Image (cartoon, rainbow, N blue to C red):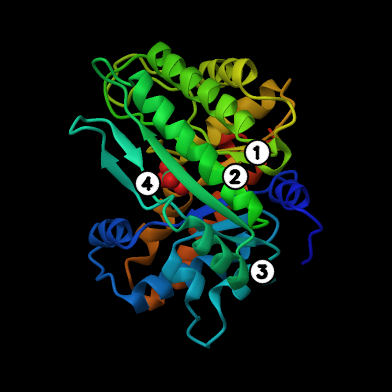
Amino acid sequence: MTFTNIEDIANYLVADGKGFLAADESTPTIGKRFDAINTESTETSRRDYRELLFRASGMDENISGVILFDETLRQASADNTLLKDVILKTGALPGIKVDKGVASINDSEEVLTGGLDGLEERCTEYESLGAKFTKWRAVIKIGENMPSDNCIEANMQALADYAKIVQQSNMVPIVEPEVLMDGEHSADACFDATSRCLNSLFANLESKGVNIKGVILKPNMVLAGQGSSSQLTHEDVAELTMKCLLENVPEDLPGIAFLSGGQSDIDATANLDALNKLGGNPWKLTFSYGRALQQAALKSWLGQSENVVNAQEAFSHRAKMNRLAALGKWAEDLEG
Ligand code: 13P
């Protein structure tokens, strides 16, 4: 696949009905996912699991991009094909997580994502290894006096610096300002925090001269905190999320690919579907799910080779359901 510029890559990644598989769990994070299914995390077991996903039939038609961790971009399959080539064969593009995780801001509960040091050199290498896009995740918490203006500004500045460097390496930056759903906060608090982040993010992207037509936004949906007793309906999530996006995101951004952030598989699909049924948005609205695409597959797989086909079916089903949601054509009775 050849692209003339980053805008072409961005448009390819948000083609109608297609979305991202986020498979970029760091080694400690995939270790926790494997612990939950009593499976040892080794270079081989991580390879086997990811290869199973990339070879599932649900990749075709539904997945435009796969976000990888450094190890996976360099890894070969059991029959010695590079995993990134397995991905390319399905029509999806390989991408790479480039941030280096979070550190506390002045010993507070708030965190700043790092990884700008040496980023230019790493991007040059990743581009030569075949990555077409990248991801950087900022983590924003809601709580007493949180998020602070300082935390938002520092994280959104870093996201803009990252995006500028990535575009100079001819890759598309996914910018991910994640307002966490942990806590008992109201949906209004999430709306407010998400608005402040998006407003600051696009001001920083503009001031750094980032080409918005070659960027993809990966935000949270506007939700009540996981511990709140007053949860929104899917229609209310869609309305509040759309309002927040319309107020803060420029029209020339090609697409928005939501994170699932701890929502159940079905909630993540139903909320995306409700957003697309609402309409009136100038950008594509799709998925970039990690847990909501993989949970069912992990539970079917259990680290056993005899379960590979069942795990692939579980993943393919979720990929298909999310394609329908990205088109606003999902319905609960299709879940079977
Ligand atoms: P979740 O969909 O599990 O939130 O993961 C998406 C992701 O890439 C987080 O950075």
Which image quadrant is residue 4 in?
bottom right
Instruction: Please give the name of the residue rendered at 61% of the width and 60% of the height, measured from the top-left corner.
Output: 58
Instruction: Please give the name of the residue rendered at 77% of the width and 67% of the height, measured from the top-left corner.
Output: 1
Q: Is mark 3 on a helix, strand or loop?
A: helix
Residue designated by label 4: 114
Please tell me which of labels 1 and 2 falls first in the chain.
2
Question: Disc number at residue 88?
Answer: 3
How far is mark 1 from mark 2, CA to CA? 5 Å
Residue designated by label 2: 164
How far is mark 3 from mark 1, CA to CA? 27 Å
Question: Disc number at residue 219?
Answer: none
How far is mark 2 from mark 4, CA to CA? 15 Å
Query: In the orientation shown, which residue stands out farthest toward the bottom?
Result: 79
Residue designated by label 1: 210
The reply to whether discs 4 and 3 touch (Cβ–Cβ < 8 Å) is no
Amino acid type at image mark 4: Gly
Above or below — where is 274 with respect to 162? above
Please tell me which of labels 4 and 1 falls first in the chain.
4
Amino acid type at image mark 2: Lys
Q: Is residue 11 left or right of residue 51?
A: right
